[in-house]
């Protein structure tokens, strides 16, 4: 069994059953687009896949092995992009990216990553001067750092990554994702449709969490 | 280990560039301590007698004030999630944040304490015990405080809540910190009291990073 | 053993069956205990009738401390085995413990007035430690209710309870050191087997009465909490 497989996954938040019986399988080189209304559990599913949130029931396997068996190994294969931008206003663009790259033990090849998302000119600007879209690009540039490293994470979990991006930045993101897929990577992306979905086209499968609502 | 230093360095950089935040605790420390003479009167007999205790109480409050900011920025901008997913164990993340907190508040309080000792006409004999007791006591404040800061992430009115959680746990440090100064003033032996403060520090060092890490993991769920 | 009670429904049935018995035992123990405490035990030759405050003060102190231990154990169970009832037990017990602590402080203060001549005596390490215990209880209760998601409040409070439990001996040691240094304590002592049985027996009966009262109230509160939780879940799922 290749890639990521999920069986009979239930998610409970507080006292509320968010979704039940979710099953999915994503092979290397494929992306999965999650859709569903607000509150249908797209973010929760991604957070469960990242190991940030415990599932109420169900199993997750990566290449046939239960993820729960080795949580640390699982952490190392993930690149997770959440709603917020972990960008420190007091650090420059370059320093922000370099910090995360080093903390994750990746090659701190900053310049090419910034270039990939079109913010190379901002490298020495303190991040407090960035616009929301520029901060998003900086957050996404971390994916590029991993991509250019020999041991970059193979599983990308992206929670509405295109929020606040202009069309040219969405195209840059799509190119990054396509390059990742071409490199036998896996990407699971929560989205509300739009440019990114179109750009990924035939490389992506779709899952509507509305179908798993209790 | 590299990750630990990396995180400490980032937090120090942010603190120095942010400027005012770190300085606030020290300004509060001095300001609050100068209120006491206005309240109890300028009697040169009384001030040296209460000086050690007042400096310690105010140091406690100043350290506590800065706790709310300890994890909240990282919590709000999603950095905390990325820490959980990083190869650096959460205990090390907690320890790094604690060390950074101490370096940006505890150390500054230590530097400012002699100024207050002068304000309170403390005799020269009390200076060294005051500094040494704070050197051993303030890291314990950062360690215990980190637990409270982590537990209240995402809570309503977290600032008041932190003080309710943390201040009772600070009492032992306060008791022995102030006793060191008192004993020195009375010409008594205070080495044993410093040992007790050191013991508290070791205990807190052994337990607090784990409790903080557990609390941080809960916070991002 | 533990998992037999894991099911909240089974617990509710069990609690409903046990409740009348513990309630009855509480009432009987209180009637007997109060009779002994007020009428059938001698007045103290030094303190006179005020010594009878002890029959409330000391049992309340026992239960207040036992309750914190109970919360700490339940918190450990909740964190390690993720047992849902443990959270509810800890959450239900905390306000009870705080109540007993307030009784200890109030009766201690009432007792202190004729004994020491002051309402509050800092030199009494025991009473001062109990004051800190009250703060620990209040922090626990506040933290439990500080979150929009009750599960998060329960988990945070569980960590706090364990941290507090580890700290209690340290706080007690510190306060005792501090108190003896500042003033030799003239504490009401009830040490060991030297107490006369005419005092000890009513004291033990009152201790049992307080314990049974605690158990009764705990069961009532846990059942109410379970019912409230069920109602909340039904409402949420009906809203889907």
Image (spheres, coloured by chain):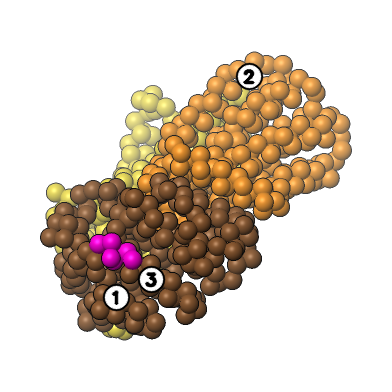
Whether residue C43 is visible here, answered yes or no, is no
Please tell me whether residue C31 is drawn above or below residue A189 in the rendered image.
Answer: above
Left or right, A24 with reference to C80: left
Figure quadrant of residue B108: top right
Q: Specify the chain shown as orange.
A: B
Which mark is in front, 2 or 3?
Answer: 3
Mark 1 or mark 3, which is nearer the start of the sequence?
1
Dot 1 crowding, Cα within 10 Å, few <14, some 14–19, many 20+: many
| x, y percent for residue A63 | 17, 57
The answer to whether A212 appears left or right of B220 in the picture is left
Tint of chain C: yellow
Magenta-highlighted residues: A179-186
Residue at 68 percent across and 28 percent down: it is: B131
**Which chain is home to disc 3?**
A
Which SS class for mark 2?
Answer: loop
Per the rendering, the mark at residue B190 is 2
Q: Colour of chain A?
A: brown
Q: Are marks 2 and 3 on the same chain?
A: no
How many circles with numbers are drawn on the protein?
A: 3
**Marks 2 and 1 share the same chain:** no
Q: CA distance from mark 2 to mark 3?
A: 68 Å
Q: Position of residue A41 (x, y in %)?
A: 31, 74
Q: Which mark is residue A148?
A: none
């Amino acid at each position: 069994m290749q890639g990521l497989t999920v069986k009979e996954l239930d998610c409970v938040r507080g006292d509320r059953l968010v979704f039940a019986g979710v099953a999915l399988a994503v092979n290397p080189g494929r992306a999965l687009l999650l859709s569903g209304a607000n509150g249908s559990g797209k973010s929760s599913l991604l957070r469960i896949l990242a190991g940030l949130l415990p599932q109420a029931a169900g199993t997750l396997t990566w290449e046939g092995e239960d993820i729960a068996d080795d949580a640390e190994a699982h952490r190392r294969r993930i690149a997770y992009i959440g709603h917020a931008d972990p960008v420190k206003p007091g650090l420059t663009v370059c320093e922000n990216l370099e910090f995360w790259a080093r903390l994750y033990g990746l090659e701190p090849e900053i310049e090419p990553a910034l270039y990939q998302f079109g913010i190379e000119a901002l490298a020495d600007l303190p991040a407090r001067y960035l616009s929301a879209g520029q901060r998003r690009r900086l957050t996404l540039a971390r994916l590029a750092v991993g991509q250019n490293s020999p041991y970059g994470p193979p599983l990308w979990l992206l929670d509405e990554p295109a929020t606040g991006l202009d069309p040219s930045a969405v195209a840059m993101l799509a190119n990054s994702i396509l390059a990742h897929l071409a490199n036998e990577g896996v990407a699971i992306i929560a989205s509300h449709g739009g440019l990114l979905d179109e750009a990924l086209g035939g490389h992506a499968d779709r899952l509507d969490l509305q179908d798993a609502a209790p | 280990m590299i990750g630990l230093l990396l995180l400490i360095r980032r937090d120090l950089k942010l603190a120095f560039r942010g400027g005012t935040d770190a300085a606030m605790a020290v300004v509060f420390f001095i300001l609050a301590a100068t209120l006491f003479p206005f309240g109890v009167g300028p009697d040169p007999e009384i001030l040296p007698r209460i000086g050690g205790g007042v400096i310690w109480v105010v140091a406690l409050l100043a350290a506590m004030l800065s706790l709310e900011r300890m994890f909240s920025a990282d919590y709000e901008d999603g950095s905390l999630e990325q820490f959980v997913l990083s190869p650096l164990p959460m205990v090390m993340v907690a320890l790094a944040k604690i060390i950074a907190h101490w370096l940006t508040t505890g150390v500054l309080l230590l530097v400012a304490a002699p100024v207050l000792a002068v304000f309170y006409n403390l005799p020269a004999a009390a200076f060294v015990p005051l500094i040494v007791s704070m050197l051993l006591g303030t890291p314990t404040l950062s360690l215990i405080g980190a637990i409270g800061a982590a537990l209240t992430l995402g809570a309503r009115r977290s600032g008041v809540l932190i003080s309710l959680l943390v201040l009772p746990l600070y009492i032992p440090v306060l008791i022995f910190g102030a006793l060191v100064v008192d004993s020195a003033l009375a010409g008594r032996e205070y080495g044993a009291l410093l040992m007790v403060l050191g013991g508290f520090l070791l205990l807190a060092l052994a337990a607090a990073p784990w409790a903080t890490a557990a609390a941080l993991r809960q916070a991002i769920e | 053993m533990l998992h037999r009670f894991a099911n909240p429904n089974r617990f509710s049935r069990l609690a409903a069956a046990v409740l009348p018995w513990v309630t009855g035992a509480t009432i009987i123990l209180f009637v007997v205990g109060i009779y002994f405490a007020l009428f059938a035990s001698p007045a103290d030759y030094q303190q006179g009738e005020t010594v009878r405050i002890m029959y409330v003060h000391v049992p309340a102190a026992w239960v207040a401390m036992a309750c914190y231990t109970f919360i700490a154990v339940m918190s450990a169970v909740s964190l390690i085995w993720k047992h849902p009832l443990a959270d509810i037990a800890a959450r239900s017990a905390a306000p009870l413990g705080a109540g007993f602590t307030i009784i200890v402080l109030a009766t201690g203060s009432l007792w202190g007035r004729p004994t020491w001549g002051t309402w509050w005596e800092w030199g009494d390490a025991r009473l001062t430690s109990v004051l800190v215990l009250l703060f620990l209880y209040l922090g626990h209760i506040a933290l439990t209710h500080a979150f929009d998601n009750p599960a998060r409040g329960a988990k945070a409070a569980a960590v706090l309870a364990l941290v507090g439990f580890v700290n209690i001996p340290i706080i007690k040691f510190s306060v005792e050191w501090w108190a003896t240094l500042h003033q030799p304590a003239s504490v009401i002592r009830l040490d060991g087997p030297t107490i006369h049985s005419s005092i000890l027996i009513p004291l033990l009966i009152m201790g049992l009465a307080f314990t049974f009262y605690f158990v009764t109230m705990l069961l009532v509160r846990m059942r109410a909490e379970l019912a409230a939780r069920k109602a909340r879940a039904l409402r949420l799922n009906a809203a889907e």
